[in-house]
Image (spheres, rainbow, N blue to C red):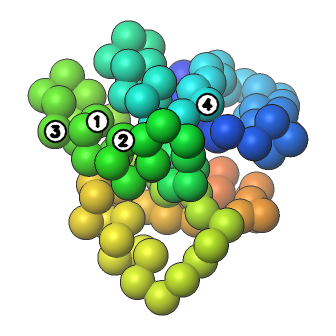
């Protein structure tokens, strides 16, 4: 099954989401901040990235821009995850290079559908 890079600094969110993804057969790797996400994307070459936007060190917006500006990682689809759903966040996510956007708390069936669509499953 596909490798997913889960970028999430909240341990409870990371644990809950990773366990649900692993039960579905996904190979999940983690980054706890935006800087780590950029290097993990290059090193791990995941099939998809779930990117929290509110991160320490470097936020998810900037991390996504850097991932998308690197020829080695630009093709990796990114789904932005944010708890602070504000008007304009979808546009901001797409502008940063995200292919899709979802809100927290995560509606797992909806997120899974978005992931499967991006992965061509």
Whole-angstrom CA distance, mark 2 to mark 1, is: 6 Å
Q: Earlier in the sequence, mark 3 or mark 2?
A: 2
Q: Is residue 92 left or right of residue 95?
A: right
Locate residue 49, reporting x and y percent: 48, 38
Locate residue 99, reporting x and y percent: 36, 57
Q: Which residue is mark 3?
A: 69
Asked whether the viewer can see residue 30, the reply is yes
Determine whether label 2 and label 4 are within 8 Å by CB.
no
Q: Which residue is mark 4?
A: 32
Q: Residue at image x 59%, y 77%?
A: 85
Of badges 4 and 1, the one in the foreground is: 4
Tell me the tag on residue 67: 1
Determine whether label 2 and label 1 are within 8 Å by CB.
yes
Determine whether label 3 and label 1 are within 8 Å by CB.
yes
**Does residue 64 sit above or below 21 in this rendering?**
below
**Element marked by disc 1:** helix
Q: Is residue 64 left or right of residue 107?
A: left
Whole-angstrom CA distance, mark 2 to mark 4, is: 12 Å
Q: Nearer the viewer, residue 113 or 28?
A: 28
Q: Residue at image x 67%, y 39%?
A: 9
Q: Quadrant of residue 68?
A: top left
Determine whether label 3 and label 2 are within 8 Å by CB.
no
Of badges 3 and 2, the one in the foreground is: 2
Q: Earlier in the sequence, mark 4 or mark 3?
A: 4
**Does residue 56 sit above or below 84 in this rendering?**
above
Of badges 2 and 1, the one in the foreground is: 2
**Element marked by disc 4:** loop
Q: Which residue is mark 2?
A: 63
In the rendered image, which quarter contains the N terminus? Answer: top right
Whole-angstrom CA distance, mark 4 to mark 3, is: 21 Å
Q: Earlier in the sequence, mark 2 or mark 4?
A: 4
Q: Residue at image x 42%, y 75%?
A: 90
């Amino acid at each position: 099954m596909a490798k997913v890079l889960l970028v999430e600094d909240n341990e409870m969110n990371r644990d809950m989401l990773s366990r649900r993804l692993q039960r579905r057969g996904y190979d999940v790797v983690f980054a706890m901040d935006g800087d780590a996400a950029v290097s993990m994307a290059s090193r791990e070459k995941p099939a998809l990235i779930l990117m929290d936007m509110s991160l320490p060190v470097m936020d998810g917006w900037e991390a996504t821009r850097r991932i998308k500006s690197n020829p080695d990682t630009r093709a990796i689809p990114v789904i932005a995850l944010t708890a602070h759903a504000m008007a304009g966040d979808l546009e901001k996510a797409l502008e940063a290079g995200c292919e899709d956007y979802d809100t927290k708390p995560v509606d797992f069936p909806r997120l899974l559908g978005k992931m499967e669509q991006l992965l061509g499953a």
